[in-house]
Structures are given as C-alpha cells and as structure tokens.
Image (cartoon, rainbow, N blue to C red):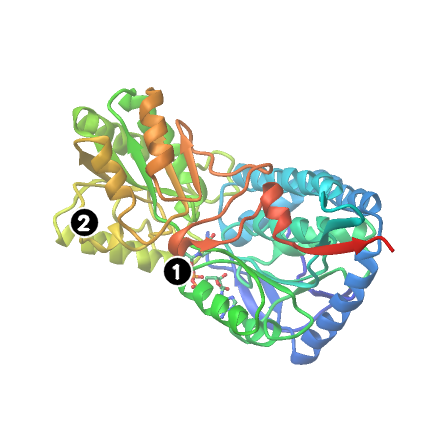
Amino acid sequence: MADYPLIELYIDGQWKRASGQTIINPADESVLGTVPTATRSDLDDALAAAGKGFAIWRGTAPAKRAQIILKAASLIRERVDQMAAAMTLEQGKPIEQARLEILRGCDIIEWDATEGLRLYGRVIPSEPGMRHTVLRQPIGPVAAFSPWNFPMSSPARKVAGALSAGCSIILKASEETPAGAAQLVRAFHDAGLPAGVLNLVFGNPAEISDYLIPQSRIRLVTFTGSIPVGKHLAEMAGRHMKPAIMELGGHAPVIVCDDVDPVSTAAASVVGKSRNAGQVCVAPTRFFVQENIYEQFAHSFAERASQLKVGNGLDPSTQLGPLANARRIDAMETLVTDAKTKGARVLAGGQRIGNRGYFFPLTVLADVPDDARAMNEEPFGPLALVNPVKTLDEAIEKANALPYGLAAYAFTRSASNADRLAEGVEVGTLSINHFVASVAETPFGGVKDSGYGREGGTEGLQCYTVVKNVSHKTL
Ligand code: NAD
C-alpha cells in the first residue's frame, strides 16, 4: 500500500496542522486522511506573509530566483514516484499518468524559471533629449485557485508563473486532491525559497475566495475550474479592479476529415479521450467525422474503448482509473440517459461499473442529437460523442456552435484544410493530427466562456507582470 502524506497548511515558511474534511480514495471510497481548514486568522497571516514575501522576492536577482525554482523542480523529479502514488490514491488516475503529470509540471517549472530571466522591457525612441523606457515589473501577490483534476501540474503552472515573474503567491489548492500541491510546495520549501513567497491554504473554497480576492494586497487572481465559478470569481475580481487569469471549462470538438485513416485516428482518439478518465478541460469530446469514414471510425473507436483495462490506478496495467468523485458518476449517468432518450446509439460503455469506487467505462455514443445535454454541457468524464458531417464547413460551424472555446483537434492530410481550420475554429488552442493541447513553451487558455488570460509560454509569464512607462527628459 502506497503512503499518503500528512496534509498541512504552509504559511510564512511554516507548516501548520489543523483539522478539516476527509480525503477519499476514489478507487475504493476509503479515507486517506484529512485536509486542514484555514481560519480567518490563517488567511490574514498568509496575506501578511505574501506581502513580506513579495518585497523579498522582487528584490532578489532573477538569476538567484531561477536557481531556487530550478532546484525545486529537480527535487520534484527525484521524488516523482512517491508523489505519483499519492496523487493516484487521491485522484484515481493511472500511476503512469500521475508520473507524466508530475514530469510535465517540472517541464513547466523549468521553462518558466529560465524565461523569467528574459522578461525584458523596451526602450522607445523619441525626440532628442527624451527617452521612454517600458519596465516590465512583477504584478504583486497573487491569489491562485487550482482544481482537483491535475493536483500537481495545475498548481505548478500558477506557482511557476508567479514566482518566475517575481511575484509571491497564496495558493488555495483542491481540498479533494491536496497532496499534489502539498508536495509541490514542500519541494520549494526544501529548495530554500524565502518564507512568505509561497503560501498554501485549504478550506471552504467560497469563503477563502470571498475573503482573499477583495484584499488590497492581492494584485492578481488566477483560477482553473468550472465556468460558473470562474464567472463568479471574475466578477469579484472586476469589482475590486484585479486582473484575472481564468482557465475554465471546454467541450473540445474533434474534426476528422475523410483523407485520414479512420482506424488509427480512432485508436489515437481512445488514448486522448481516456486520459485522466476524460476529466480534463481539453478532453476531446464532440467528434465530427466526415460521412465516408464515419461508421468505420465510430466502430473502431467503440471497439478500442471497450478493450481498455479499467481498475485501480495503482495497478500498472490499468488504462482507465476511477472518476475522481461521486459527482462525476452522477453527471455521466444523467448525460448518458438523456442522450439515449433523445435517440443516441450507445456503441460502448454506458453504465457504472460496480458500486464501490467511482468506476465508469469509456462510453461512446453515436448519432447524438444537437439538443442532447451532453452535446451542450461539458461532460468532464469518459464520454465521447460521435456524429457525421458532410463538409469541413459544416464541421467548423458545429465546432463553433457552443459558448466554449478552449481546445479543438482536427485530423487531415490537407494543408488547405489545416489553414481553414486554423482560421475558422474559435478556440485558444488547436491541435492538428495529435491530441496534445499544451506544452510548457506555448500559451494556453480559452476564448468565449472558456475564459481569458494565458498560462504557459511567454504570454503566460507576462500575465504576472505590469508594464510601467518611464519617460525621462534630459535636463
Ligand atoms: P465546481 O464548480 O463545484 O468546482 C470547480 C472547482 O472550483 C473546484 O476545484 C472547487 O474547489 C472550486 N471552487 C468552487 N467554488 C469556488 C469558489 N467560490 N471559490 C474558489 N474556488 C471554488 O465543480 P466540480 O464538481 O468540482 O467540478 C466539475 C466541473 O468543474 C466540471 O464540469 C468542469 O467543468 C469543471 N472543472 C474544470 C476544470 C478545468 O481544468 N478547467 C477543472 C476541474 C473542474
């Protein structure tokens, strides 16, 4: 049995125990431990620490900052096995996926750390005797809220971005999957990060965001999670004139043109869809397949989906772990029943597996009507919806029909199709002929209801800065 770590608050460089809610293993519904609840006074301490930490960190040379951040990443790489086991216990994902998430988190931390050395300003030419210098400065203490589906890489993105740009941060990570964030923070502590620069709290999410966001010390809000919560937090940030990075939900379309092999594309789709049991904001969900290859694609997809090994993520042969919580099982059952009632065909899966642990198979529905709830609401689970289209234009129109605009995928051998897709699909990230939606060096984020601001890449780091123009006239 893998060990699950003790979860504590981390404020001003000190670990603090406290009582709180239980953490459940989604594979067998056993109790793993408890997550501490921060009191109002803990939050006040975290705010004071983040204020003090910012003064220290912004005054630290970028090269020294990068050294500490890179040291934290190297400690995480050394601890990857132990961290991965804890994340599989709390979140359910197969152990190899947990390892990959951590290593990807390290890639992000390392890329941001070195990019932090290159947050240059500009000198703008002007009339003689006048010089305009644009400084790019760290924005200040950040309030960050990370979700349960990527317990390590989501907080890592926020922490790496803030710290690499010279900001301090108060991270409120998920209460349901706290170990990923706790172990991330421990690595920064062990790497010698000055006290106060990074603080970790847990508790009642609404109470914490309601309290932190309006505080004058907080200069930026970053949130990853659902659209309704994102809109609520963005409103609050707006009321208090704080910029925000909002990484919200998606309902990614996948456009499969008839110039590709339907069988290998279906195989790749099963891998893409089953990652983290579909509990991914960029999960491929609405498959629009050109008529000529539709039936072959749909049946290959269903056949491969049915062959996935479902089980406890700690078993290395597991390909599909449990869903992270009982809410996701309820959502899958509701969406599948609704789609079936409206005429969708169930080609694979469709029903919960067993009644202990939150297991649900990769479910493939075909001919799903546009008014089925699953076609309009983010499933956030192992549900793939496959529908035929006649033309690329029809596929693009359907892809753009929802208020979501996070990720999209397309498969084609035609450069002209690829150009039309790049121009026409309304998303923050489009991947052609593969299912990787973001890497450390590229900006990631949404349009429309999927949010604004970017994480990753140069654009991501810039979100943690403000520009100041200094206009200097020679006397
Ligand atoms: P939810 O809307 O209750 O919560 C989503 C996340 O926001 C959770 O991590 C939660 O702790 C946090 N949260 C909720 N209220 C908050 C508040 N007032 N202040 C700060 N944080 C708050 O939904 P859920 O059941 O946990 O997750 C299901 C839905 O959330 C999915 O359908 C999906 O759309 C979305 N989600 C998206 C992502 C993503 O990566 N974009 C991640 C997790 C969940």
Q: How many marks?
A: 2
Residue 20 percent coordinates (x, y):
60, 72
Q: Residue 286, how many percent across, how many down?
A: 29, 42
Read off the residue under disc 2.
Answer: 370
Identify the mark nearer the N-term, 2 or 1: 1
- Examine the rendering and report whether any part of residue 235 can be seen: yes
Name the quadrant of the C terminus: bottom right
Q: Residues within 10 Å of mark 2 (few under 14, many from 20)?
A: some
Q: Nearer the viewer, residue 84 or 393?
A: 393
* 143 relative to 65 in the view: left or right: left
Residue type at the position of mark 2: Asp
- The verdict on label 2 being within 8 Å of ligand 1 is no
In terms of depth relative to the viewer, which is nearer, 299 or 71? 71
**Which numbered marker is on residue 313?**
none
In the depicted structure, whether residue 449 falls above or below residue 240: above
Dot 1 corresponds to which residue?
326
Left-right relation of 282 to 126? left
Seen as rendered, the residue at the extreme front is 128
Secondary structure found at label 1: helix
Image side of residue 138 versus residue 393, left or right: right
Q: Amino acid at mark 1?
A: Ala
